[in-house]
Amino acid sequence: MTKPRSKVRRAESLREALEGDIATGRYPAGTRLDEVTLANRFEVSRTPIREALIELSVAGLVEIRPRRGAFVREIGIPRLIEMFEVMAELEAMCGRLAARRIAPRELANLQAAHEACNLACEDGDPDAYFHANQTFHEAIYRASHNGFLADQARSLQNQLKVYRRLQLRVRNRVAMSLGEHQQIVDAIARGDAEAAADHLRQHVLIQGERFNDFVASVASHREETEAEQPLRSAAG
Amino acid sequence: MTKPRSKVRRAESLREALEGDIATGRYPAGTRLDEVTLANRFEVSRTPIREALIELSVAGLVEIRPRRGAFVREIGIPRLIEMFEVMAELEAMCGRLAARRIAPRELANLQAAHEACNLACEDGDPDAYFHANQTFHEAIYRASHNGFLADQARSLQNQLKVYRRLQLRVRNRVAMSLGEHQQIVDAIARGDAEAAADHLRQHVLIQGERFNDFVASVASHREETEAEQPLRSAAG
DNA sequence: AATCCCATTCTTGTATACAAAAAAGATTGA
DNA sequence: TCAATCTTTTTTGTATACAAGAATGGGATT
């Protein structure tokens, strides 16, 4: 058995597995998620698969078209920009609250996470940086001392994961990101709420813009061959 | 036939129905939502009921405890405060964007919605005001021209619906609310993004505080008889 | 009388069966 | 050869059946 750990609620682990498969690009945007195929793959019946797909659809990762099936959500560029806009504001809010409320131990965690980012950057490993970066932001979410806000931020970050990851491939982005992190840490450390909010907002908005550049370059290169299918090839 | 309209996807209409029942207090916080009971009530099998409950759990209205069942989420005061904190920021963001982006027709809609609130206030009908108020805020969501943000705001408003409604019972709250609306409309009309954001933020935060007052008075009155069960009696 | 343990019952979680809608394919006509 | 319609097949949505965990109640023991 591959997964003997989970006694109950198979749909939960299925959801996580599918979430991962979508994030890693195993199922690119637009892919049809066939219930029986998935059921065979995970060796369960259609029932828990359906439940997992429903969860993913409410979470926004999947779109269920009635009587048509479930598809990995194709997020068009306009909506993606909207999502980055919201993400920037949520992160800014986390930063503002964190600057006011962070505990010494949490600040130590944040600085440690920042250090980890530094190391990953020096190693030149974008994947390692991606994970360290997630930990860094998670530390800020926690330090906001607003559990609901943290949940919202995590959920949205999860939806944007694929695109944030792509964006790290952009030239010089990792080094830039690191510098922004430094400013964020400093602002939070000295309790400057508005500076923390501003730096975080910019940090995320820049990601959105850089991503936009990236997509634009891919799109213009692609226009010669394909019709305009938002992001299909970008995510694959 | 009670509901012949919906051809497909019974789970969707079930979710909406349950959402309504939770919002109106038919199922107060903490209530156990028994699958077979619901199945009998809606004259369907357990399958679509389960799917609806799963949707509600992801949306945050219901908590599913594995092998124990689904319960109407008991939102404790601390989390409720957190939620109002986030709601305030989302609405502020809607206002900021709306002030920059609103179209003449949308502004007319907003002013019309404000007028409707005025009328409901003069009639002294809190329920009518509640609905007019929702339309007012919806107009701002739309005017933000950020569909994703609007979705998030609606979703959170839906979760807070019960408590916002309660809060309108507080003395003088409706008249106060109306005055705040006027300031919001003015700020948006003259394109003052920061003023719109600030007024909306305050508008929501005050709701949270007033609600807090309300709960506090109920709670202190209750402490004499019951143990501290967050909000059970407040929602019933 | 109170407590602990076992059996029964109830409820959830999963599998399977069935119905209806949509997609695919074939056949017929122009 | 192409198009349109009818038929077949596939796939979703729902109902039902079954298994296992949790709750409940009764009986035995102290």
Image: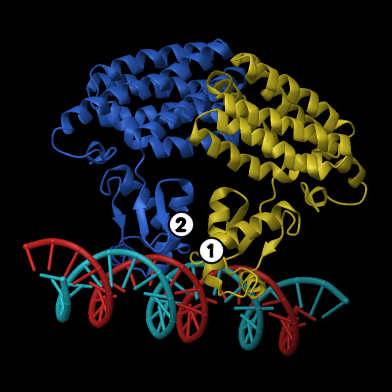
Chain colours: A blue, B yellow, C cyan, D red
Task: Decide: is A11 above or below A160.
Answer: below
Determine if residue B84 is in view. Answer: yes
Mark 2 or 1: the one toward you: 1
- The reply to whether discs 2 and 1 touch (Cβ–Cβ < 8 Å) is yes
In what element is the residue under mark 2?
helix
What percent of the width, then of the height, locates residue A146? 61, 32
Q: Residue at x 68, y 55 (%)?
A: B20
A234 lies left or right of B166: left
Q: Which residue is mark 2?
A: A54
The chain carrying label 2 is A
What percent of the width, then of the height, locates residue B38? 64, 70
What percent of the width, then of the height, locates residue A24? 28, 43
Q: Which residue is mark 1?
A: B11
Q: Dividing the picture into quarters, in which one does residue A49 lie?
A: bottom left
Task: Decide: is B226 above or below B137.
Answer: below
Q: CA distance from mark 2 to mark 1?
A: 10 Å
B31 lies left or right of A154: right
Type of amino acid at the residue the image marks with label 2: Ile
Q: Residue at x 41, y 30 (%)?
A: A135
Which corner quadrant holds the C terminus of chain A?
Answer: top left
Task: Decide: is A179 above or below B78.
Answer: above
Q: Out of C4 and A126, give the one closest to the viewer.
A: A126
Q: Residue at x 64, y 44 (%)?
A: B158
Other residues around mark 1 within 10 Å, as few (<14) / some (14–19) / many (≥20): some
Which corner quadrant holds the N terminus of chain A?
Answer: bottom left
Q: Out of A187 and A103, give the one closest to the viewer.
A: A187
Type of amino acid at the residue the image marks with label 1: Ala
Count of numbered circles on the image: 2
Q: Residue at x 56, y 29 (%)?
A: B143
In what element is the residue under mark 1?
helix
Q: Dividing the picture into quarters, in which one does residue B185 lie?
A: top right
The chain carrying label 1 is B
